[in-house]
Image: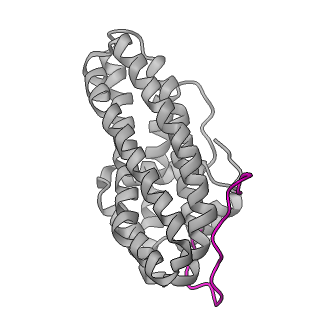
Amino acid sequence: MKIEYASLPGEVPPPVPDGPRLCSGDDMRILHNAFLWGYEQAPELVRAVLSGDTNRSKFVGEWLSNLDKTLHSHHESEDLLLWEKLEKRSPSCALHVGQMRAHHAQVASLLDDASPLLEQWTTTADKRIGEQLAEAYERLLEVLKVHLRREVVEVVPIAEKVLTAEEWEAIGEHSRAAIPKSRLLPQLGMLFANSSPEDRAAFYATMPAAVKFLWKVSGRRQYKHEYEHLFPGEPIPETI
């Protein structure tokens, strides 16, 4: 899913503090693009599973469960390591931070709604439950399209001026620590696949040498294998 990261009529971003840019928040936009793509795919992935095909529902269900857990850990990292710093260091953005907190609560509630449906559907491939699950993901996507766009537009420019590079990196590290190691490389492929060539190259350049090595040796292959199984017969998006 491609969205324009810009304010809509009636939305007023907070004033950006003066001073140098202390960290780069470009990775937030790249991550958000991947989340939006994932949740755009979710309803149709569920609806396409034939009734009773538990082999397929298990595969798709595990992928969706990992996507949900990654989104949750991403929001948890911001709740713990971002919002309070922004409120203290740039009080003029407190209202916008409050809106971001409210969005997170709404997303958490929607994930809670989807979770039992996902668990039931994964083990049964029941069409009725699957339709309820698909509709739950559609409701979640509508919230994310607002939240993820506004976070990049309204929050990231402030964070770049008041958080150090080390503090910003700590948010990412906290999120990654919650992701099983077996999922890191396929999810990295999802980030690359939903980035522009320029963003892809810039993101790759910041990766540790060890991660670059793992991506070249096995990550690209893991991503392609997963994509082929998720979307049989479809072209595999370019990564790096």
Is 201 within the magenta?
A: no
Residue 131 appears left or right of 13: left
Residue 161 seen in this snapshot:
yes
Say if the magenta span includes residue 10. yes
Q: Residue furthest right?
A: 9
The C terminus - image quarter: bottom right
Q: Residue at x 44, y 75 (%)?
A: 169
- Which residue is painted at 40% across and 43% down in the image? 67
Residue 90 drawn above or below residue 8: below
Q: Position of residue 215 (x, y in %)?
A: 47, 58
x and y percentages locating residue 164 in the rendered image = 48, 85
Q: Report the span colored magenta.
A: 6-25
Q: Nearer the viewer, residue 167 or 59?
A: 167
Q: Position of residue 134 (x, y in %)?
A: 45, 24
Residue 191 in percent (x, y) is at: 54, 53
Q: Is residue 111 above or below residue 232?
A: below
Of 176 and 116, nearer the camera is 116
Rendered position, 14 above or below 69: below
Q: Quadrant of the N terminus?
A: top right
Magenta: predominant secondary structure element?
Answer: loop
Foreground: 192 or 14?
A: 14
Residue located 48% across and 83% down the image = 89
